[in-house]
Amino acid sequence: MALEMDSKTGRLNGLGRILALVRPYRGRFVAACVCLLAASGIGLVYPQAVRIAVDEGVTSGSLDALDRIGLALVGLFVVQAIFTWWRHYLMSWLGERAVADVRRRLIERLVRLPPGWFHERHTGELVGRLAGDVTILEGAVGTELSMAMRNAIQLIGGVVLLFVVDVQLTLIMLCVVPPMTISLMVFGRRIRAMSKAVQDAIADTNARVQEVFGAIDTVQVFGQEQRESERYGAGVERAFERAIGLARWRATFMATASLTGFLAIGAIVWLGGRRVATGEMSPGSLTAFLLYTTVVAVALASLTSLWAALMRAAGATERLFAIIETEPAIQSPAEPKPLPAGAQPLRFEGVFFHYPTRPDVPVLRGIDLTIAPGQTVALVGPSGAGKSTLTALLPRFYDPDEGRVCFGGIDLRELDLDELRARIAIVPQDPVLFSGTVAENIAYGCPEAAPEAIEAAARMAHADDFVRSFPQGYDTLCGERGVQLSGGQRQRIALARALLRDPEVLILDEATSSLDAESEALIQQALTEATQARTTVVIAHRLSTVRDADRIIVFQEGRVVQSGDHTTLMRQGGLYRKLVERQLGANERQATSSGDA
C-alpha cells in the first residue's frame, strides 16, 4: 500500500498517514511483513496438500501417503503458528507505538496552541479526538492493517494457484472480481464520508455533555436538568440516525458481496463436478480448487469490511493530524533577540486589537502606554473596556492587529516565547488549580522548588495558616479545578504560585475579588510587600484596592481616557471620579441595608 498524497493539499491522505506512522519503525514492520508472508504462504499450501491426499491417498487407498501428508501438515501448521505469533506481536507493538506517538504529538501541539484557538472549540470535541479517534487508529495499525495485508496476500496467491489448478474455472471466478472491486471503491468512499459524519455527531454530543458536567451546579440551580437531558437525547438520536444510515450502506455492500461470492462458488461446484465426471479433472484438483475459491472468497469478503474499517481509521487519522499540523499563530521567531537582564520597561505603541471570533468588534483602539520598571499600575474602567485584553498581550496570548508591545524596548514578537513568559506571572480572577496537592499547585511554575520555598510563598500570600489547618497540610488534594477549596483559598494558592516564581512582571486580574474584607486587607499588605521590587499591573473593580498604585490608567471603550495617581484623578473629575463615587454610594447603601437588617 503506497503512501498516497492528497492532490489538492500535497499532503499525505489518511491511509498514507497511517503507514507513515510506522515508518520510523520500519525494521519491525519489515519483520512483521516477513512473518505475514510466511504464515500466509503456508496457508496457501494447505489446499495443495489436500489435493495430494485425495488423489494419492484417498483415491488410491494408500494409508502411508496419508500418514506422510498428515505429519507434514502438522509440521507446517506449527511453523505457521510461530510466524503468526510473531506477526501478531510485532503488529500489535507497532499499533501501540503509533498510538503513543500520536498522543504525545497531539499533546505537544495542543499545549502550545494559543488560548484563542481553544476558545473557538469545544473541550469535549478535543477530548473525543484524543480518546475515540486514537482508539480507532490503534485498531487500524495494530490489527486491521495486518489483516488487510494478510487477506491481500491470500487473495493474490489464491488467484494465482487457481490458474495453476484450472484456467477455465478460474476465468469464471474472475468474472466476479472487477465489479466487486469497483463497488468496493464506491462504497468505501461513501462509508468514509458517513463514518466521519457519525464521529462528528458523537463529538458534538460529547462536547455538550462535558460542558454540562463542568457547570452542573448552574444546571441544577436553574432547574434545567430535563432540558439538558432532552438536548443530549436529541444529539444521541442524530448520531444514531447517521450510524444507522452507515449500517445500511455497509449491510447492503456485505450482502451483495456475499451473494455474488456464493453464486460463483455454486457455479464452480456445478461446472467442476461435470469436469470430474468427464475425466478432465481429478477429484483432488476439484477439492483444491474449491478450497482456494473459499480462500479467495473469504479474503475478498474480509477485505471489504477491512477496507471500510481502514477508511474509518483514515478519517480519524486526518482529524488527528488536522490538530498536529496546526501551526500556532503565536510562536517564537527563528532567531529571537536576547531579553536584557534586570527590570525592564513595558511599552504599548499604537496598539489596536480585536478577537478573531469577533473581527467587527474592536477591543483596543490605539493604546499608547509606558510602564516603568518596578512601577505598580492599576487598570480600571467599566467591564469590557479592554483591561484584561491589554494584559493578555503581555505574555503573547494574542498579538496586536496594529502597533506593538515592547519589553525592554524589544517587540515581544522578536523574543523567545518561553523566556518572555518566564518573567511574567498572572493571578487571574478565577484561578485554576489542578487536582494535585496544595504544594504541587503552588510549585506548578517551579516544579523543583524546595518545601521551604513553597511554604514561604504561601506565608507571603497569607495561605500558610489555612493550609496547615488541613489534616494533610500541604499534601491536601485540591480536587479537579480546586473544588475542595473556597474561592478565597484558591486565589491565595494562585497568588502563592505566582510569588514563588519571583517574576519581574506580576499581573493581578481581580486577584482579591473572592476574598472577604479581612482577607483582602491581609492580601493587600502582602501585595504591597511583594510588588516593591517588580513591575505590577493590577486590574480591579474594587477601586479601594488601587488607591495606592503609582499610576491609575482609566479605560473606556478600548481607549485610555485618564492617567494619574488617585489624588490627581479625583481632582480632575471625569470617569474615574464617577466610578469612585458610584462605588462609594453602593457601599454606603449596602452598609445601611446591613444596619437595618
Image (cartoon, rainbow, N blue to C red):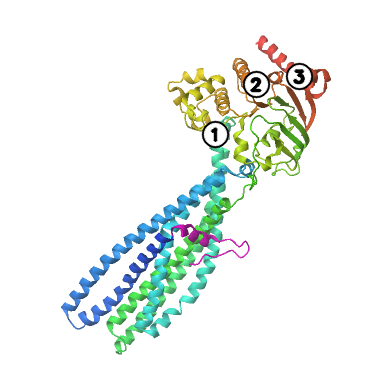
Q: SS for tag 2?
A: loop
Image x and y of residue 494, in percent: 56, 27
Task: Report which quarter residue 217 is drawn in.
Answer: top right
Q: Is residue 365 left or right of residue 293?
A: right
- Which of 180 and 380 lies nearest the eye of the viewer? 380
Question: Which is more N-terminal, label 2 or label 1?
Answer: 1
The amino acid sitting under disc 2 is Gln
Instruction: Give the alpha-carbon distance from disc 3 to disc 2, as whole Å.
Output: 18 Å
Is any atom of residue 205 visible in this view?
A: no
Residue at 33% from the left image edge and 86% from the top image edge = 274
Instruction: Give the alpha-carbon distance from disc 3 to disc 1, as whole Å.
Output: 42 Å
Tell me: residue 158, above or below residue 526. below
Q: Residues within 10 Å of mark 2 (few under 14, many from 20)?
A: few
The amino acid sitting under disc 3 is His
Is any atom of residue 583 visible in this view?
A: yes
Task: Report which quarter residue 375 is drawn in.
Answer: top right
Q: Which residue is mark 1?
A: 216
Q: Residues within 10 Å of mark 1 (few under 14, many from 20)?
A: some
Q: Which residue is mark 3?
A: 566
Q: SS for tag 3?
A: helix
Residue at 61% from the left image edge and 43% from the top image edge = 118
Q: Which residue is mark 2?
A: 532
Tell me: residue 89, above or below residue 585. below
Question: Which is more N-terminal, label 1 or label 3?
Answer: 1
Tell me: residue 486, above or below residue 312. above
Could you tell me how many numbered marks the image carries? 3
Q: Is residue 24 part of the magenta span, yes or no?
A: yes
Image: magenta residue range: 1-25
Q: Nearer the viewer, mark 1 or mark 2?
A: 2
